[in-house]
Image: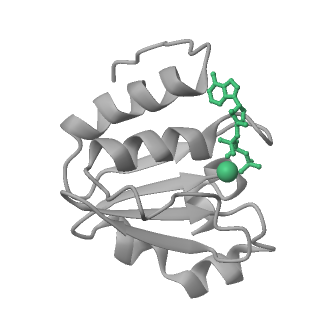
């Protein structure tokens, strides 16, 4: 597996990097976002959405009390935020695997809260 390290110094740069990634994403790709509060995870998703051609009116923000949002672009973008999930049972009820193998791109904020073995 190869890895790329990239430091972003501004929200605009974070969005630009994400939009570039969106250009090469394919259906079934899953992107796990890990970082503390305010790290820029949602900002990254805004860039992904822009890169996928999600209409500007469909404002992308943290789902807050909504655990899943879907935005329609070149491919559907499924946006999970696991911050407020209390346990693997709540996660299981959302049925994330359906989205992981689906027709769109799945992006998960706070993905490290539930490692794959918990699902
Ligand atoms: N290089 C950067 N990349 C992204 N955001 C940045 C950067 N520098 C500063 N910011 C600012 O940091 C904040 C990041 O907020 P954002 O909602 O994207 O974080 P988050 O990781 O989703 O937080 P949360 O865990 O609360 O959902 C924004 O206010 C943004 O303007
Ligand atoms: Mg967020």
Residue at 51% x, 25% y is 12
In this picture, is 116 found above or below 17? below
Q: Is residue 6 left or right of residue 61?
A: left
Rendered location of residue 3, percent (x, y): 40, 18
Residue at 41% x, 15% y is 4
Question: Quadrant of the image for the C terminus?
Answer: bottom right
Residues 12 and 7: in front is: 12
In this picture, is 80 found above or below 18? below
Rendered location of residue 104, percent (x, y): 27, 63
The colour style of the image is one colour
In this picture, is 45 found above or below 79? above
Q: How many marks?
A: 0
Question: Quadrant of the image for the N terminus?
Answer: top left
Rendered location of residue 32, percent (x, y): 51, 46
The furthest residue to the bottom? 93
Residues 1 and 39: in front is: 39
The quadrant in which residue 117 appears is bottom right
Q: Is residue 11 left or right of residue 29?
A: right
Q: Regarding ligand 1, which quadrant of the image does it lie in?
A: top right
Q: Is residue 106 left or right of residue 103?
A: right
Rendered location of residue 66, percent (x, y): 65, 77
Q: Is residue 1 left or right of residue 46?
A: left
Residue at 26% x, 70% y is 102
The quadrant in which residue 62 appears is bottom right
Residues 97 and 34: in front is: 34
In this picture, is 30 found above or below 85? above
């Amino acid at each position: 597996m190869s890895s790329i390290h990239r430091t972003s110094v501004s929200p605009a740069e974070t969005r630009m990097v994400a939009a570039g990634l969106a250009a090469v994403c394919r259906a079934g790709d899953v992107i796990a976002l890990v970082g503390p509060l305010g790290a820029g995870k949602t900002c990254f998703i805004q860039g992904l959405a822009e890169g996928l051609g999600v209409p500007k009116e469909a404002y992308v923000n943290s789902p807050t009390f909504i655990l899943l949002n879907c935005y329609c672009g070149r491919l559907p973008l499924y946006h999970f935020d696991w911050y407020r999930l209390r346990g693997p049972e709540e996660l299981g009820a959302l049925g994330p695997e359906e989205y992981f193998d689906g027709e769109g791109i799945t992006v998960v904020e706070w993905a490290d809260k539930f490692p794959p073995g918990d699902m």
